[in-house]
Structures are given as structure tokens and as C-alpha cells.
Amino acid sequence: MLRWIFALLLIPFLDAVILAIVVSQTTYIGWVGMVLLVVLTGLVGMLLVRAEGRRTIRKMQRSMAQGKPPTNELLDGGLLIAAGAFLLTPGLVTDIIGFLLVVPLTRLPIRAALKRFVIVPYADKKTGGFASGKVWTFGFPDEGMARESTQTSSADGGTYDLGADDYSVDANNGEESYTIDFGNESTTDELDDDTDDPSAR
């Protein structure tokens, strides 16, 4: 977050430096001409933002009429809002950034990169993979780790074998409740008792 704030604060500084270099190095463009150039680019950019905004709204309406989520159109709308803010800010750097965001030829790659590297990872992080469809349809994500931990605990602590006399089933009001008596003995699989009930394991 601090990097983005620093980048936004760096843009006015770059604008001031570039304006000073252009005015000092060129004799036919003075301060008045530079101000007029900045105002002219801002007006042209705002006309482009207005035209692209209407086009994006029409595309959004068509997508919603077809029952499709207007995700790209919403991203275009956000980029056009940012483009309008950059074009209204006086300066050459902000005007260049605004034109990059408003022209469809350069806005589409920016939208694709923003969607792939920022929006989809953030949505997946918040929804556990449901945003992009990367969900687990069988088992659990940590099934292998759970199996290893279960095998380790079984090897360390052994297994409990329940015989026919070690558990009881009580039926109260139609609901079954189970009572298991582990006792104090823990046996391993090698010491299984033949008299135990196999169905209880």
C-alpha cells in the first residue's frame, strides 16, 4: 500500500520536472503555450472518457440482458474513472497515463493484467478459490498431510481394539447413544484378540 502511495506522490514531482525541462529547453513553447497544451489534452481526454463511458454502459447493458456478469465492463468503468482523474490533473505525465487508460487499444492489456494479477488472486484469497472455480471437488486440500499425521499418531500411540463388551448401545426415546469404555490398555495391530467383534473395529 505504501508503494502505491509513493508512486502517486511521485507523479506530480515528475510532472513538474518534465514541464521545467520542456519549457527551458524549447524556445518556441513558453509557459503560456505549455499551460494551453495541458488544458487542450485534458479537454480532448475528457471527451474520449465520455465517449468510452457511454460505449461501456451500452456493453454492460447488453451483457446483463444476455444474463452474463459484466465483469470486464465494470473493470473498464473503473479504469475510465481513473483516466478521468488523471486527465483532469494538470501535467504531461498524468495526461499520458490518462490517455493510456482511456484508449481501448492500450486499456485492454491493462485490464487483462489487472484482472489476472490483482483481482483474481485477491478474490481467490477471500473466497477460498470460489471466484475462479479452483475448488476441491474430492477429498480435502490437506488430505495428504492429515493422513501422514494420522499414521504418525497411530504409530506412536498404538490403536484401540474394542471387543463386544467394551461398548454398549442405549436407545432412549428412539435416539441411539453409544457408550465406549477404552479402559487403560492400548494394544497394537499385532496383538489383536480373536474373540473381539470384527464389526466393532
Image (cartoon, helix red, strand yellow):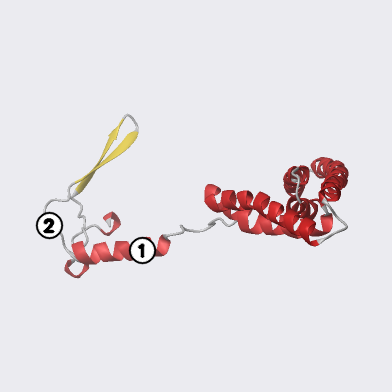
Above or below 171: residue 194:
below
Taking the spot 74% from the left edge, 59% from the top edge, the residue there is 21
Q: Is residue 132 something one can see in this rendering?
A: no
Q: Is residue 27 left or right of residue 74?
A: right
Q: Nearer the viewer, residue 55 or 160?
A: 55
The residue that disc 2 covers is 185
Task: Estimate the spatial distance between the alpha carbons at disc 1 and disc 2, rounded to whole Å.
Answer: 24 Å
Which amino acid, by three-letter code, is at mark 2? Glu
Residue 12's tag is none
x, y percentage for residue 117? 62, 58
Q: Residue 147 got which mark?
A: 1
Pick whichever, 199 or 80, lies toward us: 80
Q: Nearer the viewer, residue 200 or 110?
A: 110
Q: Secondary structure at mark 1?
A: helix
In the image, residue 140 lies at what x, y percent?
46, 57
* Horizontal relation, residue 93 to residue 58: left or right: left
- Image quadrant occupied by the C terminus: bottom left
Q: Residues within 10 Å of mark 1 (few under 14, many from 20)?
A: few
Of residues 13 and 153, the one drawn nearer to the viewer in this rendering: 13
The residue lying at 84 percent from left, 44 percent from top is 39
Q: Residue at x 79, y 62 (%)?
A: 25
**Tag 2's secondary structure?**
loop
Judged by depth in the image, the label closer to the viewer, 1 or 2, is 1
